[in-house]
Image (cartoon, helix red, strand yellow):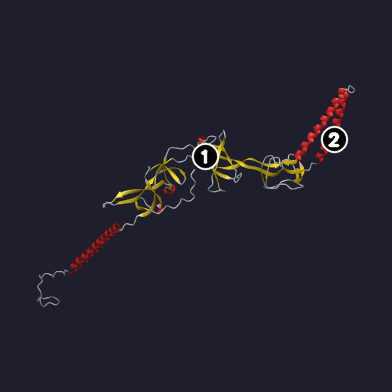
Amino acid sequence: MNIVTEHKISGEPIDTKAPKRPVRPVLWFIIVGTLLAALVGGLVWFNYFRGQMIQQFFANNKPPPTAVSAAEAKSEVVPNLLTAVGSLVAVHQVDVSADVNGRVTEIKFEPGTRVEAGTPLVQLFDAPEQGDLANYKAQATVAQLSLDRAKQLAARQFGPQATVDAAQASYDQAQAGIAKTEALISQKLVRAPFSGDLGMRKVEVGQYLTAGTAIVSLTDLSQLWANFTVTEKDSGNLKVGQVVRLKVDAYPGRTFEGKITTIEPQIATDTRNIRVQATIANPEKILKPGMFVTTTVVLPDKPAVITVPETAVDYTLYGDSVFMIAEKKEADGKTSLSAVRTFVQTGNRVDGRVEILKGLKAGDKVVALGQLKLQSGAPVSISTDPAPPIPAQPPRY
Protein backbone atom coordinates (compact mmCIF):
# COMPACT_ATOMS: atom_id res chain seq x y z
CA MET A 1 0.00 0.00 0.00
CA ASN A 2 1.20 3.42 -0.86
CA ILE A 3 1.38 5.55 2.22
CA VAL A 4 1.30 8.72 0.28
CA THR A 5 -2.00 7.88 -1.26
CA GLU A 6 -3.61 6.66 1.98
CA HIS A 7 -6.75 8.51 2.97
CA LYS A 8 -6.23 11.32 5.57
CA ILE A 9 -2.50 10.97 5.58
CA SER A 10 -0.46 13.95 4.53
CA GLY A 11 2.24 13.78 2.09
CA GLU A 12 4.98 14.87 4.45
CA PRO A 13 7.35 12.42 5.88
CA ILE A 14 6.49 10.81 9.16
CA ASP A 15 9.67 11.95 10.94
CA THR A 16 9.06 15.62 10.20
CA LYS A 17 8.97 17.74 13.56
CA ALA A 18 5.86 19.74 14.70
CA PRO A 19 6.03 23.58 14.37
CA LYS A 20 6.87 25.76 17.51
CA ARG A 21 4.15 27.71 19.49
CA PRO A 22 3.84 31.46 18.73
CA VAL A 23 5.52 33.94 21.19
CA ARG A 24 2.70 36.52 21.31
CA PRO A 25 1.22 35.56 24.77
CA VAL A 26 4.64 35.87 26.47
CA LEU A 27 5.20 39.28 25.01
CA TRP A 28 1.72 40.31 26.15
CA PHE A 29 2.39 39.28 29.77
CA ILE A 30 5.72 41.11 29.71
CA ILE A 31 4.14 44.29 28.41
CA VAL A 32 1.27 44.16 30.95
CA GLY A 33 3.67 43.53 33.85
CA THR A 34 5.87 46.40 32.76
CA LEU A 35 2.90 48.74 32.59
CA LEU A 36 1.65 47.67 36.02
CA ALA A 37 5.09 48.15 37.53
CA ALA A 38 5.31 51.59 35.93
CA LEU A 39 1.85 52.48 37.24
CA VAL A 40 2.63 51.37 40.81
CA GLY A 41 5.97 53.13 40.71
CA GLY A 42 4.28 56.27 39.45
CA LEU A 43 1.75 56.18 42.28
CA VAL A 44 4.48 55.68 44.86
CA TRP A 45 6.53 58.50 43.42
CA PHE A 46 3.45 60.75 43.22
CA ASN A 47 2.62 60.15 46.91
CA TYR A 48 6.22 60.82 47.89
CA PHE A 49 6.33 63.93 45.76
CA ARG A 50 3.00 65.16 47.17
CA GLY A 51 4.19 64.62 50.76
CA GLN A 52 7.36 66.53 50.04
CA MET A 53 5.43 69.37 48.47
CA ILE A 54 2.98 69.52 51.40
CA GLN A 55 5.84 69.48 53.89
CA GLN A 56 7.63 72.18 51.97
CA PHE A 57 4.43 74.22 51.74
CA PHE A 58 3.80 74.17 55.48
CA ALA A 59 7.47 74.74 56.20
CA ASN A 60 7.44 77.87 54.08
CA ASN A 61 3.96 79.01 55.18
CA LYS A 62 4.05 79.11 58.99
CA PRO A 63 1.04 80.76 60.67
CA PRO A 64 1.68 84.23 62.08
CA PRO A 65 2.56 84.43 65.79
CA THR A 66 -0.38 84.72 68.20
CA ALA A 67 -0.68 88.16 69.79
CA VAL A 68 -0.75 87.90 73.59
CA SER A 69 -0.41 90.23 76.55
CA ALA A 70 2.70 89.63 78.60
CA ALA A 71 3.45 90.24 82.26
CA GLU A 72 6.60 90.00 84.31
CA ALA A 73 6.97 87.87 87.40
CA LYS A 74 7.75 90.19 90.30
CA SER A 75 9.29 89.68 93.70
CA GLU A 76 7.17 91.61 96.19
CA VAL A 77 5.91 91.51 99.75
CA VAL A 78 2.35 90.23 99.69
CA PRO A 79 0.07 91.27 102.57
CA ASN A 80 -0.33 88.39 104.99
CA LEU A 81 -4.09 88.10 105.32
CA LEU A 82 -6.34 85.58 107.03
CA THR A 83 -9.81 85.48 105.51
CA ALA A 84 -12.91 84.05 107.17
CA VAL A 85 -16.68 84.49 107.08
CA GLY A 86 -18.99 85.48 109.90
CA SER A 87 -21.93 87.65 110.87
CA LEU A 88 -22.60 90.94 112.63
CA VAL A 89 -24.16 91.14 116.10
CA ALA A 90 -25.22 94.25 117.99
CA VAL A 91 -23.35 95.01 121.19
CA HIS A 92 -26.65 96.19 122.74
CA GLN A 93 -29.85 94.67 121.38
CA VAL A 94 -32.98 93.49 123.19
CA ASP A 95 -36.67 92.82 122.71
CA VAL A 96 -38.29 95.22 125.18
CA SER A 97 -40.90 93.48 127.35
CA ALA A 98 -42.96 94.12 130.49
CA ASP A 99 -41.94 92.72 133.86
CA VAL A 100 -45.55 92.08 134.97
CA ASN A 101 -48.88 91.16 133.45
CA GLY A 102 -51.20 93.94 132.40
CA ARG A 103 -53.41 95.53 129.76
CA VAL A 104 -51.93 98.12 127.41
CA THR A 105 -53.58 101.48 127.93
CA GLU A 106 -51.20 103.71 125.99
CA ILE A 107 -48.38 103.34 123.45
CA LYS A 108 -45.93 106.19 123.78
CA PHE A 109 -43.50 105.50 120.90
CA GLU A 110 -43.36 105.52 117.11
CA PRO A 111 -41.82 102.47 115.38
CA GLY A 112 -38.45 103.05 113.75
CA THR A 113 -37.51 106.11 115.79
CA ARG A 114 -34.52 106.66 118.02
CA VAL A 115 -35.09 106.88 121.76
CA GLU A 116 -32.88 107.69 124.72
CA ALA A 117 -32.41 105.54 127.78
CA GLY A 118 -35.44 105.82 130.12
CA THR A 119 -37.90 106.98 127.46
CA PRO A 120 -41.45 105.71 128.25
CA LEU A 121 -42.65 103.23 125.66
CA VAL A 122 -45.84 101.50 126.86
CA GLN A 123 -48.23 102.18 129.76
CA LEU A 124 -50.07 99.24 131.34
CA PHE A 125 -53.24 99.58 133.39
CA ASP A 126 -52.16 100.70 136.89
CA ALA A 127 -55.31 102.17 138.50
CA PRO A 128 -55.32 99.65 141.41
CA GLU A 129 -51.69 100.40 142.19
CA GLN A 130 -52.40 104.14 142.02
CA GLY A 131 -55.19 103.64 144.55
CA ASP A 132 -52.92 101.66 146.83
CA LEU A 133 -50.34 104.41 146.57
CA ALA A 134 -52.86 107.06 147.64
CA ASN A 135 -53.90 104.84 150.56
CA TYR A 136 -50.34 104.36 151.75
CA LYS A 137 -49.62 108.05 151.43
CA ALA A 138 -52.65 108.84 153.62
CA GLN A 139 -51.52 106.28 156.16
CA ALA A 140 -48.06 107.80 156.08
CA THR A 141 -49.55 111.25 156.80
CA VAL A 142 -51.52 109.97 159.81
CA ALA A 143 -48.54 108.00 161.04
CA GLN A 144 -46.35 111.08 160.71
CA LEU A 145 -48.75 113.16 162.83
CA SER A 146 -49.06 110.42 165.45
CA LEU A 147 -45.32 110.09 165.59
CA ASP A 148 -44.83 113.84 166.05
CA ARG A 149 -47.38 113.98 168.94
CA ALA A 150 -45.87 110.93 170.61
CA LYS A 151 -42.42 112.46 170.43
CA GLN A 152 -43.69 115.75 171.96
CA LEU A 153 -45.46 113.96 174.82
CA ALA A 154 -42.46 111.77 175.48
CA ALA A 155 -40.21 114.81 175.56
CA ARG A 156 -42.40 116.36 178.31
CA GLN A 157 -42.57 113.09 180.21
CA PHE A 158 -46.32 112.81 179.51
CA GLY A 159 -46.12 109.68 177.39
CA PRO A 160 -44.18 106.40 177.33
CA GLN A 161 -41.46 105.60 174.85
CA ALA A 162 -43.45 102.59 173.66
CA THR A 163 -46.00 104.93 172.12
CA VAL A 164 -43.22 106.64 170.16
CA ASP A 165 -41.88 103.29 168.91
CA ALA A 166 -45.32 102.15 167.81
CA ALA A 167 -45.92 105.39 165.95
CA GLN A 168 -42.53 105.11 164.32
CA ALA A 169 -43.29 101.56 163.19
CA SER A 170 -46.60 102.63 161.71
CA TYR A 171 -44.92 105.43 159.81
CA ASP A 172 -42.21 103.11 158.49
CA GLN A 173 -44.81 100.58 157.34
CA ALA A 174 -46.65 103.30 155.45
CA GLN A 175 -43.40 104.41 153.79
CA ALA A 176 -42.62 100.81 152.84
CA GLY A 177 -46.05 100.46 151.31
CA ILE A 178 -45.49 103.62 149.32
CA ALA A 179 -42.12 102.36 148.04
CA LYS A 180 -43.55 98.96 147.07
CA THR A 181 -46.53 100.48 145.30
CA GLU A 182 -44.35 102.95 143.41
CA ALA A 183 -42.19 100.03 142.27
CA LEU A 184 -45.28 98.21 141.01
CA ILE A 185 -46.41 101.36 139.21
CA SER A 186 -42.98 101.77 137.62
CA GLN A 187 -43.24 98.20 136.32
CA LYS A 188 -46.49 99.12 134.60
CA LEU A 189 -44.65 101.87 132.68
CA VAL A 190 -42.21 100.15 130.25
CA ARG A 191 -39.15 102.30 129.50
CA ALA A 192 -36.21 101.98 127.07
CA PRO A 193 -33.33 100.30 128.92
CA PHE A 194 -30.70 102.07 126.79
CA SER A 195 -30.44 104.49 123.89
CA GLY A 196 -31.02 103.01 120.46
CA ASP A 197 -33.29 102.56 117.45
CA LEU A 198 -36.71 100.99 117.79
CA GLY A 199 -37.99 98.33 115.46
CA MET A 200 -41.54 97.37 114.49
CA ARG A 201 -44.30 97.52 117.07
CA LYS A 202 -45.60 94.14 118.24
CA VAL A 203 -48.47 95.18 120.55
CA GLU A 204 -51.70 97.16 120.36
CA VAL A 205 -53.72 99.26 122.77
CA GLY A 206 -56.06 97.07 124.77
CA GLN A 207 -53.92 93.96 124.37
CA TYR A 208 -53.30 92.00 127.56
CA LEU A 209 -49.61 91.28 127.98
CA THR A 210 -48.05 88.58 130.06
CA ALA A 211 -44.64 89.11 131.59
CA GLY A 212 -41.90 88.66 128.99
CA THR A 213 -44.04 89.35 125.92
CA ALA A 214 -41.99 91.25 123.31
CA ILE A 215 -43.22 94.79 122.73
CA VAL A 216 -40.61 96.22 120.33
CA SER A 217 -36.97 95.59 119.47
CA LEU A 218 -34.35 98.09 120.59
CA THR A 219 -30.92 98.14 118.97
CA ASP A 220 -27.89 100.30 119.54
CA LEU A 221 -26.19 100.56 116.11
CA SER A 222 -23.27 102.72 117.19
CA GLN A 223 -21.09 99.66 117.78
CA LEU A 224 -21.27 96.11 116.47
CA TRP A 225 -19.53 92.80 116.99
CA ALA A 226 -18.26 90.70 114.08
CA ASN A 227 -18.25 87.04 115.10
CA PHE A 228 -16.29 84.62 112.90
CA THR A 229 -14.39 81.36 113.21
CA VAL A 230 -10.92 80.28 112.12
CA THR A 231 -9.29 76.88 112.02
CA GLU A 232 -7.16 75.47 114.77
CA LYS A 233 -4.10 75.80 112.52
CA ASP A 234 -4.60 79.57 112.13
CA SER A 235 -5.49 80.25 115.76
CA GLY A 236 -1.83 80.70 116.71
CA ASN A 237 -1.54 83.75 114.44
CA LEU A 238 -4.35 85.67 116.13
CA LYS A 239 -3.93 88.23 118.90
CA VAL A 240 -6.24 90.69 120.60
CA GLY A 241 -5.84 94.12 119.01
CA GLN A 242 -5.12 92.94 115.46
CA VAL A 243 -6.81 94.91 112.69
CA VAL A 244 -9.81 93.28 111.02
CA ARG A 245 -11.28 94.51 107.73
CA LEU A 246 -14.81 93.59 106.74
CA LYS A 247 -16.81 93.56 103.53
CA VAL A 248 -20.57 93.12 103.22
CA ASP A 249 -22.69 92.36 100.17
CA ALA A 250 -24.92 95.37 100.81
CA TYR A 251 -22.06 97.81 100.14
CA PRO A 252 -19.75 96.38 97.47
CA GLY A 253 -16.40 98.08 97.18
CA ARG A 254 -16.47 99.44 100.73
CA THR A 255 -14.27 98.18 103.56
CA PHE A 256 -15.03 98.57 107.26
CA GLU A 257 -12.34 98.30 109.90
CA GLY A 258 -12.29 97.10 113.49
CA LYS A 259 -10.09 95.27 115.97
CA ILE A 260 -10.12 91.85 117.57
CA THR A 261 -11.41 92.21 121.13
CA THR A 262 -12.15 88.63 122.17
CA ILE A 263 -10.69 85.23 121.29
CA GLU A 264 -12.53 82.21 122.63
CA PRO A 265 -10.21 80.42 125.08
CA GLN A 266 -11.28 76.96 123.93
CA ILE A 267 -11.53 75.23 120.56
CA ALA A 268 -14.75 73.49 119.54
CA THR A 269 -14.23 69.73 119.69
CA ASP A 270 -16.69 68.98 116.87
CA THR A 271 -15.29 71.38 114.25
CA ARG A 272 -11.81 72.14 115.63
CA ASN A 273 -12.50 75.82 115.00
CA ILE A 274 -12.07 78.75 117.36
CA ARG A 275 -14.49 81.66 117.67
CA VAL A 276 -13.17 85.19 117.31
CA GLN A 277 -14.97 88.48 117.98
CA ALA A 278 -14.03 91.89 116.61
CA THR A 279 -15.57 95.21 117.60
CA ILE A 280 -16.59 97.49 114.73
CA ALA A 281 -17.49 101.18 115.03
CA ASN A 282 -20.61 102.04 113.04
CA PRO A 283 -20.93 105.84 113.10
CA GLU A 284 -22.98 105.92 109.88
CA LYS A 285 -25.27 103.18 111.21
CA ILE A 286 -25.34 101.48 107.82
CA LEU A 287 -24.19 98.11 109.12
CA LYS A 288 -26.99 96.00 110.56
CA PRO A 289 -26.94 93.06 112.97
CA GLY A 290 -27.32 89.76 111.15
CA MET A 291 -25.41 90.82 108.04
CA PHE A 292 -23.13 88.23 106.44
CA VAL A 293 -19.56 89.55 106.41
CA THR A 294 -16.23 88.51 104.95
CA THR A 295 -13.54 89.24 107.50
CA THR A 296 -9.85 89.70 106.77
CA VAL A 297 -7.35 89.73 109.63
CA VAL A 298 -4.16 91.63 108.84
CA LEU A 299 -1.23 89.48 110.03
CA PRO A 300 2.48 90.43 110.12
CA ASP A 301 4.13 90.56 106.67
CA LYS A 302 5.85 87.48 105.25
CA PRO A 303 9.09 87.46 103.21
CA ALA A 304 8.91 88.58 99.57
CA VAL A 305 7.52 86.04 97.08
CA ILE A 306 7.19 85.77 93.29
CA THR A 307 3.81 86.91 91.99
CA VAL A 308 2.11 86.97 88.58
CA PRO A 309 -1.32 88.23 87.48
CA GLU A 310 -4.11 85.87 88.40
CA THR A 311 -5.17 85.61 84.74
CA ALA A 312 -1.78 84.13 83.81
CA VAL A 313 -2.34 80.90 85.75
CA ASP A 314 -4.13 78.00 84.08
CA TYR A 315 -5.83 75.80 86.70
CA THR A 316 -6.37 72.19 85.57
CA LEU A 317 -6.73 68.75 87.12
CA TYR A 318 -3.16 68.00 86.07
CA GLY A 319 -1.76 70.95 87.98
CA ASP A 320 -1.38 74.71 87.78
CA SER A 321 0.69 76.10 84.92
CA VAL A 322 1.65 79.26 83.07
CA PHE A 323 2.92 79.96 79.55
CA MET A 324 6.42 81.34 79.93
CA ILE A 325 7.68 83.42 76.98
CA ALA A 326 11.02 82.13 75.70
CA GLU A 327 13.33 83.84 73.20
CA LYS A 328 15.13 81.90 70.46
CA LYS A 329 17.52 83.04 67.72
CA GLU A 330 16.79 81.77 64.22
CA ALA A 331 19.37 80.84 61.59
CA ASP A 332 18.97 84.22 59.92
CA GLY A 333 19.86 85.98 63.17
CA LYS A 334 16.35 87.13 63.99
CA THR A 335 14.82 86.57 67.43
CA SER A 336 11.52 84.74 67.77
CA LEU A 337 9.25 84.32 70.78
CA SER A 338 7.46 81.15 71.79
CA ALA A 339 5.15 80.22 74.65
CA VAL A 340 6.29 77.22 76.72
CA ARG A 341 3.91 75.67 79.24
CA THR A 342 5.56 75.62 82.66
CA PHE A 343 4.00 73.95 85.69
CA VAL A 344 4.10 75.99 88.90
CA GLN A 345 3.09 75.72 92.54
CA THR A 346 0.70 78.49 93.55
CA GLY A 347 -0.07 80.07 96.92
CA ASN A 348 -2.48 82.74 98.08
CA ARG A 349 -4.31 85.12 95.75
CA VAL A 350 -4.35 88.78 96.76
CA ASP A 351 -5.33 91.85 94.79
CA GLY A 352 -5.58 90.04 91.46
CA ARG A 353 -2.13 88.44 91.77
CA VAL A 354 -1.08 84.91 92.66
CA GLU A 355 1.86 83.78 94.74
CA ILE A 356 4.19 81.45 92.80
CA LEU A 357 5.97 79.24 95.32
CA LYS A 358 7.86 77.16 92.76
CA GLY A 359 8.45 77.20 88.99
CA LEU A 360 9.29 80.85 88.21
CA LYS A 361 11.87 83.43 89.16
CA ALA A 362 11.76 87.20 89.24
CA GLY A 363 11.99 88.72 85.74
CA ASP A 364 10.43 85.80 83.85
CA LYS A 365 7.84 86.88 81.30
CA VAL A 366 4.55 85.01 81.17
CA VAL A 367 1.42 85.24 79.04
CA ALA A 368 -1.14 87.23 81.01
CA LEU A 369 -4.01 87.13 78.50
CA GLY A 370 -4.63 85.05 75.38
CA GLN A 371 -3.27 81.70 76.54
CA LEU A 372 -6.50 79.81 75.86
CA LYS A 373 -5.61 79.53 72.15
CA LEU A 374 -1.99 78.55 72.73
CA GLN A 375 -0.11 75.27 72.73
CA SER A 376 3.28 74.67 74.24
CA GLY A 377 5.96 75.89 71.82
CA ALA A 378 3.58 78.01 69.73
CA PRO A 379 5.05 81.27 68.34
CA VAL A 380 3.73 84.43 69.96
CA SER A 381 4.09 88.15 69.68
CA ILE A 382 3.61 90.63 72.49
CA SER A 383 0.62 92.88 71.91
CA THR A 384 1.01 96.59 72.48
CA ASP A 385 -2.68 97.06 73.29
CA PRO A 386 -3.45 97.67 76.97
CA ALA A 387 -4.73 94.63 78.81
CA PRO A 388 -8.40 94.71 79.80
CA PRO A 389 -9.09 95.22 83.51
CA ILE A 390 -9.45 92.15 85.67
CA PRO A 391 -13.16 91.68 86.47
CA ALA A 392 -14.22 92.00 90.09
CA GLN A 393 -10.72 92.96 91.15
CA PRO A 394 -10.62 93.14 94.95
CA PRO A 395 -9.22 96.26 96.60
CA ARG A 396 -5.70 96.17 97.93
CA TYR A 397 -5.47 96.11 101.70
Q: Amino acid at mark 1?
A: Val
Identify the secondary structure beneath mark 2. Answer: helix
**Residue 147 x/y as whole percent:** 85, 28
Q: Which residue is mark 1?
A: 297
Rendered residue at 49%/40% (across/down): 81
Work out whether mark 2 precedes mark 1 in sequence or the reverse, and give the earlier one.
2
Q: Of 158 and 87, which appears nearest the observer?
A: 158
**Horizontal side of residue 210 vs 143, given as left or right:** left
**Residue 80 x/y as whole percent:** 47, 39
Q: Amino acid at mark 2?
A: Ala
Identify the secondary structure beneath mark 1. Answer: strand
In this rendering, the answer to whether 268 lies above or below 343 is above
Residue 203: which disc? none
Q: Which residue is mark 2?
A: 138
Instruction: Examine the rendering and report whether any part of residue 275 can be seen.
Output: no
Q: Nearer the viewer, mark 2 or mark 1?
A: 2
**Horizontal side of residue 75 vs 93, given as left or right:** left
- CB within 8 Å, label 2 to label 1: no
**Horizontal side of residue 378 vs 218, given as left or right:** left
